Image (tube, rainbow, N blue to C red):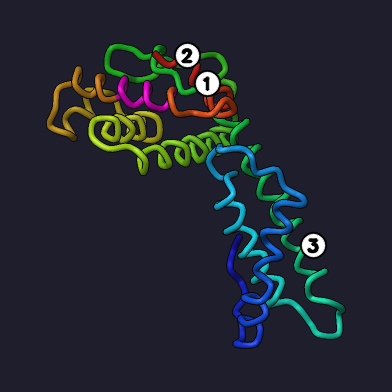
Amino acid sequence: MKKDWTLSEDRHQLVEKSLPLVRWTISRFISCGSDADGLGFDDLYQEGCLALCRAAAAYRDDKGEFSTLAVTAIRNHLLEYCARIVTQARNLPTLSLEAMNEDGREIETDSAKAQTPEDDTLSRLCIGQFLGSRKRRYTGSARLGVEALELKVLEGCGVTEIARLYDSKPNEIGAWISKAAKRMREDATESELHAFGLQDIA
């Protein structure tokens, strides 16, 4: 949510007093049982707090009870936020390590050729978000493998090129990528496995 508002001291106090509305709205209107990135309770609570702040900044005393406005604003924002996360997941490309040529570049498939520039941009944003979340979780060679995947998928680098950047051998880069792919497959949720095509990663 873009921050295009500021809070005065009295509005700040109103937000603090109204924070329980965020938790109540989530429990009443949003199913947060998913552990997919962006849809956990902490993510929803943070987004709800932003919506609450925005509602407080826009509130006028002559427009009725603040709690009514706040709950509506929080609910609407969270529904839009969840829809955006789900749409992003559906638009992610299949992340396949099997369809690579000798220098580590992905072999172009008919479905990849059919993508519009807008689809390609959205796919890159979504895959970047997914890989970034995994890079923050992993350490050691699994993290290096995610970094190599970022260079490969987002920058179009081949394994040989990545190996030069890391002053390593191409087969070592391949081992990092394989380890990262295995970790991603093991810790991905069912919805992520389906959305990201991780079932086919070796």
- Dot placed on the residue nearer the N-terminal end, 3 or 1: 3
User: What is the x, y in percent for residue 17?
Assistant: 66, 76
**Residue at the extreme left of the image, as rendered:** 167
Describe the element under mark 2 as helix, strand or loop: helix
Please rate how many residues cluster around mark 1, counting C-alpha atoms within 10 Å: few if below 14, some from 14 to 19, many from 20. some
Instruction: Check disc 3 and report the residue beneath it.
Output: 72
Comparing labels 3 and 1, the label whose residue is closer to the camera = 3
Position of residue 20 relative to residue 27, above or below, is below
Residue extent of the magenta highlight: 177-185
Please rate how many residues cluster around mark 3, counting C-alpha atoms within 10 Å: few if below 14, some from 14 to 19, many from 20. some
Report, in whole angstroms, how far the alpha carbon at label 3 lies from the one at label 1: 36 Å
Mark 1 touching mark 2, by CB under 8 A? Answer: yes
- Dot placed on the residue nearer the N-terminal end, 2 or 3: 3
Q: The residue under label 2 is which amino acid type?
A: Asp
Please rate how many residues cluster around mark 2, counting C-alpha atoms within 10 Å: few if below 14, some from 14 to 19, many from 20. some
Q: The residue under label 3 is which amino acid type?
A: Thr
Instruction: Check disc 2 and report the residue beneath it.
Output: 200
Report, in whole angstroms, how far the alpha carbon at label 1 lies from the one at label 2: 6 Å
Instruction: Check disc 1 and report the residue beneath it.
Output: 197
Q: Is residue 143 left or right of residue 122?
A: left
* Residue drawn at point x = 72 percent, y = 61 percent: 74
Q: Is residue 181 magenta?
A: yes
Q: The residue under label 1 is which amino acid type?
A: Gly
Comparing labels 2 and 3, the label whose residue is closer to the camera = 3
Describe the element under mark 3 as helix, strand or loop: helix
Q: Is residue 110 magenta?
A: no
